[in-house]
Amino acid sequence: MTKVVTICGSMKYKKEMIELATELELEKGYVVIQCVYSDRNYNDKELDILSQIHFKKIEMSDAIYVVNIDGYIGNSTQKEIAYAKKLNKEILYFNEGLSNN
């Protein structure tokens, strides 16, 4: 069965997350669900909507893939990890030895 993963991580790494999604699909055969990527400035209501949708993406996934470049995991990503743990989802890390959860 093909694994469905949602990419989680700081938007400051959006370029890396896009590249990683391609690698995960081509090399691992994963079905990758990503964030919305835009240079647009979102208002608080829009950010809340996007956050709630991202949690739904986690619910739909078998696992989350945390992009923790240089060990960095921000507040939003920490909440996503906690939510995935609550749902007993597998949690994979880009920098396996550098997770700071």
Image (cartoon, helix red, strand yellow):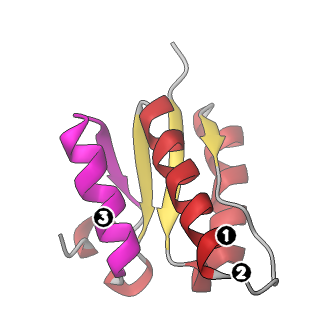
- Three-letter code, disc 1: Glu
Judge whether residue 65 is colored magenta.
no
Task: Name above or below for residue 8 compared with residue 25.
Answer: below
Image mark for residue 46 = 1
Residue position marked by numbered label 3 in the rendering: 79
**x and y, in percent, of residue 76 in the image:** 39, 73
Q: Nearer the viewer, residue 16 or 82?
A: 82
Q: CA distance from mark 1 to mark 2?
A: 6 Å
Report if the CB atoms under discs 1 and 2 are less than 8 Å apart: yes
Residue stretch rendered in magenta on the structure: 73-93
Q: Earlier in the sequence, mark 3 or mark 2?
A: 2
Give me the residue at 50% from left, 27% from top.
3
Side (left or right) of 5 relative to 79: right
Spatial CA distance of label 3 from label 2 is 20 Å
Question: Relative to residue 90, is residue 16 drawn left or right?
Answer: right
Query: Is 91 displayed left or right of 36 in the figure?
Result: left
Disc 2 on helix, strand or loop? Answer: loop
- Coordinates of residue 22 in the picture (x, y in percent): 73, 51
Which amino acid does the dot numbered 2 rest on?
Tyr
Q: Please identify, in this view, whether the residue under mark 3 or under mark 2 is nearer the observer.
A: 2
Graded by Cα atoms within 10 Å as few (under 14), some (14 to 19) or many (20 or more), the crowding at tag 3 reads few
Of residue 42 and residue 13, the one placed in the foreground of this image is 42
What secondary structure is marked by label 3? helix
Tell me which residue sits at (50%, 41%) in the image.
Answer: 56
Other residues around mark 1 within 10 Å, as few (<14) / some (14–19) / many (≥20):
few
Residue 81, image x, y percentages:
29, 57
Q: Visible in this render: residue 61?
A: no
Q: Is residue 99 above or below residue 34?
A: below
